[in-house]
Amino acid sequence: MILERLFRPRPAQAAAKALYASAVAQARDPALYGPLGAPDTVEGRFELYTLHVMLLLDRLRGQGEAAAETAQALFDAYVRALDDALREMGVGDLSVGKKMRKLGEAFYGRARSYEAAFAALPDGEPLTALMQRTVYADADATRAPDLAAYVVRQRAHLADEPLEKVRAGEVRWARP
């Protein structure tokens, strides 16, 4: 009984695991790759996973200590998933650290860019430019304004989700 309580994941960790799984499922929605034209590549998927994690982190930001703990656990789950993905792709143990450092730098750079783009709203130009530089970096960016509009809608939808549910790992995403 004591060992069970000792090794049981903290609520924030369980919630973060569910939130990350939800972000991945949303990032895999075929509408993002078909009608919105996001590239179905390793880089394109990384960008969409990161985008959806960023949206969740944005929802949790400034919402108190419990939300901050969930946000940190979500970030940790994201990093673990990236590490696992690199290993599954055959990246050797000696190279994983270097690649993870680069991915971490990319994440923090994107985090700053998303914060700035969100702060600029309702001016959608910074967000559209961010979509062009990241999601559509190696693809036709004509749908970048549509993806930016999706992000704005998704962000508003998540803002309406009850915080208690989000902190518990329950989130409903809007359709793309």
Image (tube, helix red, strand yellow):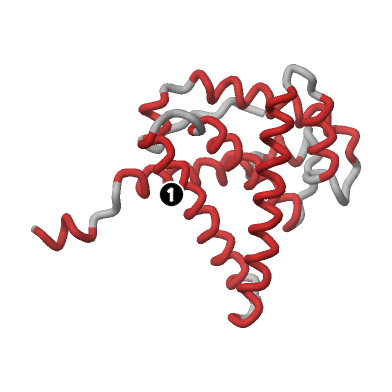
Q: Position of residue 89 (x, y in %)?
A: 65, 71
What amino acid is labelled 1 in the image?
A: Ala
Residue at point 70% right, 63% down? 102
From the viewer's perspective, tell me whether residue 120 is left or right of residue 159: right
Question: Which is nearer the eye, 54 or 149?
Answer: 54
98 or 93: nearer the viewer = 98
**In the rendered image, the vertical position of residue 19 relative to residue 96, given as above or below:** above
Of the 4 image quadrants, the one containing the N terminus is bottom left
Location of residue 15 by image quarter: top left
Which quarter shows the C terminus? top right
Residue 150 placed where, x, y %?
70, 27
Q: Is residue 66 rendered to the left or right of residue 101? A: left
Q: Please report the residue visible at 72 percent of the width from the left and 33 percent of the height from the top.
A: 116
Residue at 51% x, 61% y: name it. Answer: 80
Q: Quadrant of residue 6?
A: bottom left
Residue beneath label 1, please? Answer: 73
Q: What crowding class fits label 1: few (fewer than 14 Cα within 10 Å), some (14-19), or many (20 or more)?
A: many
Residue 106 picture quarter? bottom right
